[in-house]
Image (tube, rainbow, N blue to C red):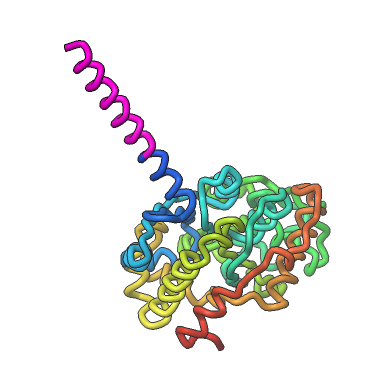
Amino acid sequence: MKWRNKVWLIAGVMVAVLAMSGCVGQEKNKKTGEGQQVVRIAIQPSCAFLPLYVARENGWMEEAMQEIGVQVEWTDFESGPPMNESMATGKQDIAVMGDVPAVANLAAGQKSTLIAAETGMQAYALLVTNESGIQSVADLKGKKIAAVVGSTAQNLTQKLLVQAGVAPQDVTLVNMGAGDALSMLQNGEIAAVASWEPNVSRLASMEGIRILADGSRVDFRAENVLMARSEYLQSHSEVVKVFLQQYVRGIIALEQNPQDCAEKVAKYFGLDAQLLAATISKYGYVMKFEAEDVAALQDTVQFLLDSGNIQKGVEVKEHVDDSLVRKVLQETGKDK
């Protein structure tokens, strides 16, 4: 009887060991890309990334990834900086962000690759109230301007001021986002607020608030980028290509029926669908990196160095690889 109990005990231990080995094997498969995989995508409610929201809302990303045995895990962020923190700890595989957090990511030494680019000159702007009496950027001298310090909005503000002959130190920059700055703008506590879409359209739609100047005034490209962890890109290029295919599919949908797309994704932006549709024309969903895109991002590096937001420069061109998106654009007839 005792011998028989020992046999069952040994058998039980062996089953447990085999089960544990199976778990380890499954974890190994997940890490090495064998079997079921998960791609983690970081997303934020910027109109620059409307194509991705269209793909998400229509379920295209999940459908396409399922065909290659990959599950999609979305993580919603408010902005780029927290994305960088998550990318740094390996919790995200692909992310979308503006030029400032993207450059900060590279300058911090993160192993990331810029895989596609978009521009949005008119998507960034300075707004004032009609009651302020401000008619030009030059009128802002000696005044208070709200903007997120270290952001693309601050970069635009400085460029507009310099063009108008106003030294950046001749204004007071208040570190504040558009939402928090609204009441101060309306009360006259600040003279202007600098922000990006959808905040620009939301504020401009309010009575008594208007756009004073936007990025097109100073040829401000306002780069937005799609980024992947370099290690992930190297080991999962097929997954990244599928991601880009569905992103481009979202671009095509926006071109063909912007109002319908806007109605489907307006809930993510807290903006009326009609206003959201109007922002689409402010962006250049080109995706390919041209020399001008790299130069604009390199200019952002200098802005961050000058403003003390980063301590070490970086050569942007060394972190760009848009070969996959060029293939996707060619395959879809968008390579123009």
Quarter assignment of residue 315: bottom right
Q: Relative to 126, does residue 21 appear above or below in the rendering?
A: above
Q: Quadrant of the C terminus?
A: bottom right
From the viewer's side, name the closer residue of 87 and 39.
39
Query: Is residue 8 one of those drawn in magenta?
Result: yes
From the viewer's perspective, is residue 319 above or below residue 288?
above
Q: Residue at x 56, y 64 (%)?
A: 226
- Magenta residues, start to end: 1-21
Can residue 86 be seen from the camera position used here?
yes
On the question of residue 138 being in view, the answer is no
Judging depth in this view, the residue of 194 and 296 nearest the camera is 296
- Residue 169, position as x, y percentages in the image: 82, 52
On screen, residue 219 versus residue 238, left or right, reads right
Seen as rendered, the residue at the extreme top is: 2
Given residues 295 and 90, the one toward you in this image is 90
Q: Give the x, y percent position of residue 239.
A: 46, 64
Residue at position x 39%, y 45% in the image: 26
Magenta-drawn stretch, dominant element (helix, strand or loop): helix
Q: Residue at x 21, y 11 (%)?
A: 2
Magenta span contains residue 317: no
